Every structure is written in C-alpha cells, then in structure tokens.
Amino acid sequence: MARFTRGFDTEAAFEHLARRDRKLGVWMRRIGPIPPDPDWRGAFDPVDALARSILHQQLSGKAARSIEARVDAATGGRLHCDTLARLDDAQLRACGVSANKVLALRDLARREAAGEIPSLRQMATMEDAAIIAALVPTRGIGRWTVEMMLMFRLGRPDVLPVDDLGVRKGAQLLDRRDAMPTPRELAERGQRWGPYRSYAGFYLWRIVDAATAAKGG
C-alpha cells in the first residue's frame, strides 16, 4: 500500500516549474523560493480542523476567532463528536454559531462517529481524490476546503484549486489576460505544472500579492 508523506521537496519543485514554464519562472525568480510550510510537519487533527473551517466560513478573521474561542471554552478546546455532543444547539447558537453551521457541525460529528471521516493515519495511504471524495459529502465542507487541507496541512504537492479566485487572478496576471481564466482553462493551463501544481498555486497567490503591493495596496 502506497504511503504519502506530508510535504515535498520545494527546491525540486522550484527547479521543475522554472524549467517547464518560462513565464512562471520569471515571477518565481523575482519573488524568490517559497520554503516548506511548517504546518506540513505539525500536529494535525482532521476532524478538529474541519470543524474550525466550518466556524470560520464567511466571517472576518476577528469575528471567527471570537466565536471559535467561545466554542473552545465550552468544549474544552477539542472539536469532535464527543465534545460537540456536550452542547445542545441552543448552546452552540449562544456561542455565535449560525444555524447552518450548527447543522454542519452536527453532520461532521455524525460522520465522525460513523467512521466516515478518515484519520490522519488513514489519509497517509489515500490519494488526493479519495480524500476529497470522503470529505465533501459533509455539510459545509466543499472541495476548496479540502484542497486547502491537502495543500497547507497535508503538504500534497500536486493540488491546483482552480475555483480559488486568488489563484485564477494570479494566472490572469501571469499570462497578461484581459480576464481571469475559467476553472477549466486554468486546469488545462496547469497541466504543465504537474507534479508540483500546489507549489505553482503558492506562486500564483504571491503574484497577486506582489501586484497589489506594486499598486500601493
């Protein structure tokens, strides 16, 4: 059974992408190497991380952190089916959790209890597509959320979040297009970046940051 390590060789990724895509290579050398993310090696609990992703959706950072802190205080700081079961819906709502997010947390907890949410150990033997397929049936968990987990927590090297507006904007700037590419166009454009499409995505976000900074914010 194949096992997938968390993280990848960013030096090899840099060399590969710079060689395969001249336009991207120019930007990469301008921005400089992006080092491995420390979170690739850090402690990571998929269920807890998904629950926190649900809490943060469609909120500013400050508001989300405030609600998250209240939920942590009520559950003991670990969000799982057993700790969430200590709170009824009214108590979660009192923490500032919306009705839709309460339903999403309940669905996540139910699926965890049923063994439907793979553990970190199980994910180490699963392809990216299998992890996505296992998690997106959960209410409130879309493909983008799982892709962010794959890229930033599991350190999978070949994930390109084609629906992400920042990534699409970066591709627009890269190719000097009049409009952002569609997700399908970006997927086709990104084929040359495999097997390091995650690293290409990191640079597309940085391209947007650099362009914004050049315009004065």
Image (cartoon, helix red, strand yellow):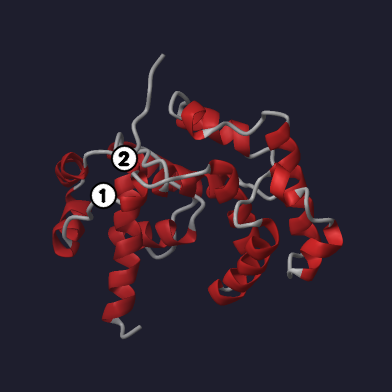
Q: Is residue 149 visible?
A: yes
Q: Residue at x 17, y 39 (%)?
A: 12
Residue 183 % position (x, y): 49, 48
Residue holding disc 2: 7
Q: Residue at x 54, y 49 (%)?
A: 144
Hey, what amino acid is under mark 2? Answer: Gly
The residue positioned 16% from the left and 44% from the top of the image is 11
Q: Position of residue 176 (x, y in %)?
A: 31, 63
Left or right placement of residue 66 versus residue 41 in this view: right
CA neighbours of label 1 inside 10 A, class few (<14), some (14 to 19), many (20+): some
Q: Is residue 139 visible?
A: no
Residue corresponding to mark 1: 36
Quarter of the picture containing the C terminus is: bottom left
| Cα–Cα span, label 2 and label 1 | 7 Å
Is 3 positioned to the left or the right of 89 in the image? Answer: left
Residue 74, quarter of the rendered image: bottom right
Quadrant of the snapshot with the N terminus: top left
Q: How many marks?
A: 2
Q: Earlier in the sequence, mark 2 or mark 1?
A: 2
In-image side of 73 versus 17 (left or right): right
Q: Secondary structure at mark 2?
A: loop
Could you say where residue 118 lies in the image, as x and y percent from the top left?
Answer: 57, 31
> In the rendered structure, are the residues bearing label 2 and label 1 in contact, judged by CB atoms less than 8 Å apart?
yes
Residue kind at label 1, given as amino acid type: Pro
